Image (cartoon, rainbow, N blue to C red):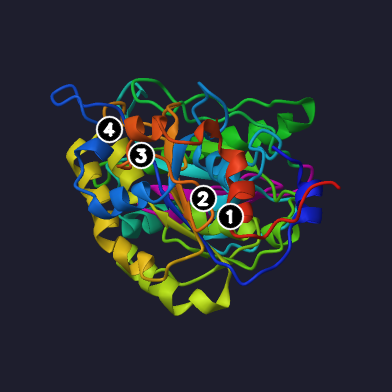
Amino acid sequence: MIEFEHIRKLSHPSPSKIVFLVIDGVGGLPRPQTGKTELESARKPNLDKVAQESICGLIDPVSPGITPGSTPAHLALFGYDPVKYNIGRGITEALGIDLALKKSDVAARGNFCTVDDQGIIVDRRAGRISTEENTKLCQLLNETSIPGTEIIVSPVKEHRFVLILRGDELSPQLTDSDPQQTGLAPKKIEALSTKAEKMAEIANKFVHQAERLLRSTHNVSPANMVLLRGFSQYPDILSMSEVYKLKPAAIVIYPMYRGLAKLVGMEVLHSGNNITDQLENLRRNYENFDFFFIHFKATDSRGEDGNFEAKVQAIEEVDAALPLLLKLEPDVLIITGDHSTPATLAMHSWHPVPFMLRSKWCRPDRVTEFSEQACLAGGLGRFPAIEIMPLAMANALKLDKFGA
């Protein structure tokens, strides 16, 4: 990947438009009964037609064999080295719900979860409780008290919440309490440096108090424990406008992706409630920006639920709405995912992700459908996700020549 300092010198504004559609968790694995992945099982004539007009390949979000979280996977899509910019989930969740943060605040992503009588996690998402129930539980958790520390607990969506810890000399250098799988107990939060020892003590006190408060509600709610991950502070990071000379916008529904878009300097537009609303909003705002990030979440959620059929239906939902985007004829259209979430695994995985780029200047290959096996034979082969943005910029004629 060419460094940002060089991209900044090469990039220049132009009227051409780049549209980046991210189908979250789109990659899958074959279902034993059929031998086909979710993409291969879905009826998707519009996605397949785009593949026939594109150059295709497979991307590795971080590195081969590494399973990425959502934040590093998306940062890589936008050209930010996910290892160098290792930003915790907490800060993007907080920005996504428009919390006013101080530079010294430490934010963590929280899940309400269900544990059994032995303290073993049986559901990491507490049955995906409603956002309304989440809000009531967050009000309860705001009763926690730790001397010298201000505690703010805010609902995000369904089972997700944000924890903000505010005080003196707080550090985000902590391990997670979330083991990210069932059948295990929540982990004790540990300091990763000596200066974070005070912070680890505070975080563990919050967890213990939260458990006590939630246990009192377990007769009416499956949420009887919390899981914390992604402790983070507001990072120093260049915006996409600074790096690429773009005027970027995001049309996203889930709060975390709103926060991520804000973090890299995108203007977050009203999204509506579904992919059709999002693409209608793209049409209305098409003349005002030259880069659009559109995020579709349901494929990832259904994959994490282990619901193969529902993930197939989510792919077909995107395909049915796609003509709204295609009518705009963007100069560069990119369709891919941030990572794979096979329903057979019911979690994020390390498998490379199908990718396609359509433009007037690309060299279409012989790929005839948008799927894992088909894209494996594409002209781009298998490549790092951080190389997508230079390809997008080049195909939009937004990069000058490098060197004499």
Alpha carbon separation for disc pair 4 and 3: 25 Å
Q: In the rendered structure, find residue 362 and report the number of the disc placed on it.
A: 2
Q: Specify the segment rendered in magenta.
A: 142-169
* Residue underneath mark 4: 343
Distance Cα–Cα, label 1 vs label 4:
34 Å
- Name the one closer to the observer, 287 or 304: 287
Which residue is rendered at x = 17% and y = 40% of the image? 309
Residue beneath disc 3 = 367
**Which residue is found at the position 29% from the left and 55% from the top?**
318
Q: Earlier in the sequence, mark 1 or mark 4?
A: 4
Corner quadrant of residue 124: top left
Residue 51 percent location from the top left of the image: 36, 47
Name the residue located 42 percent from the left edge and 68 percent from the top edge: 271
Sequence-earlier tag: 2 or 1? 2
Q: Are marks 2 and 1 in contact (CB under 8 Å)?
A: yes
First reached walking from the N terminus: tag 3 or tag 2: 2
Asked if the residue at tag 1 contacts the one at tag 3, i.e. Cβ–Cβ closer than 8 Å, the answer is no
Q: Residue type at mark 1: give it.
A: Asn
SS of the residue under disc 2: loop
Q: For the residues marked 2 and 4, what is the alpha-carbon distance in whole angstroms?
A: 33 Å
Q: Residue 70: in sight, yes or no?
A: yes
